[in-house]
Image (spheres, rainbow, N blue to C red):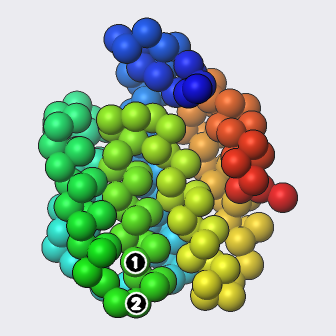
């Protein structure tokens, strides 16, 4: 059963629009922060997905557009041979999918952890950055997301 705090109010949950947008922005920021640590060249499909995600947080893109961009990123990921780049593509796909279902914001965290493990990078510093950024963007959901990360074994 999904946590009602990740379900939008208009769908019967507790998630306010501004918090939903903040979660997507956080997921996008986490994804971009991963890119700083594991620099990849971005395919135009991925650039477009990120752009749609940021536009959605401002109300300038529809959820349908975000879903299409997310699916395109995941389709592109299936064509990539480099396992690290595949994981990064999945981060983007999941981040943008947050527009549809807020709990997809956990995808970049999960795939990011796998990416760091694959590349032999320490992940605990990244988790600390993610937590700080989440608190800056969405203090009302900070404890909810932290608990979700603990339940999903994304923090140690």
Query: Relative to the observer, which residue lies in front, 134 or 114?
Result: 114
For the residue labelled by badge 1, is the local secondary structure a helix, a strand or a loop?
Answer: helix
The image shows residue 137 at horizontal and vertical percentages of 54, 38
Question: Which residue is labeled 2 in the image?
Answer: 82
The image shows residue 140 at horizontal and vertical percentages of 62, 24
Work out whether 146 lies above or below 76.
Answer: above
Q: Label 1 crowding class (10 Å Cα cut-off): few <14, some 14-19, many 20+?
A: some
Count of number-bearing discs: 2
The image shows residue 27 at horizontal and vertical percentages of 47, 50
Work out whether 111 lies above or below 100.
Answer: below
Relative to 114, 23 lies left or right:
left
Work out whether 111 lies above or below 101.
Answer: below
Residue at (17% x, 49% y) in the render? 68
Q: Quadrant of residue 85?
A: bottom left
Q: Quadrant of residue 60?
A: top left
Work out whether 35 lies above or below 28.
Answer: below
Residue at (56% x, 19% y) in the render? 4
Numbered badge on residue 118: none
The image shows residue 58 at horizontal and vertical percentages of 27, 35
Numbered badge on residue 86: 1
Residue at (35% x, 11% y) in the render? 10
Residue 47 visible somewhere in the drawing: no
Q: Specify the farthest residue to the right.
A: 156
């Amino acid at each position: 059963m999904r946590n009602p705090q990740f379900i939008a109010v208009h769908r019967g949950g507790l998630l306010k629009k501004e918090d939903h947008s903040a979660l997507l922005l956080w997921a996008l920021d986490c994804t971009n922060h991963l890119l700083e640590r594991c620099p990849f060249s971005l395919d135009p499909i991925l650039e477009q997905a990120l752009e749609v995600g940021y536009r959605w947080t401002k109300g300038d893109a529809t959820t349908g557009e975000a879903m299409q961009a997310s699916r395109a990123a995941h389709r592109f990921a299936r064509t990539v041979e480099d396992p690290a780049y595949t994981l990064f593509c999945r981060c983007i796909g999941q981040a943008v999918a947050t527009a549809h279902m807020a709990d997809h914001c956990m995808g970049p965290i999960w795939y990011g952890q796998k990416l760091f493990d694959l590349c032999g990078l320490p992940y605990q510093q990244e988790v600390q950055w993610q937590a700080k950024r989440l608190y800056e963007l969405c203090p009302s959901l900070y404890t909810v997301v932290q608990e979700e990360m603990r339940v999903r074994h994304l923090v140690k």
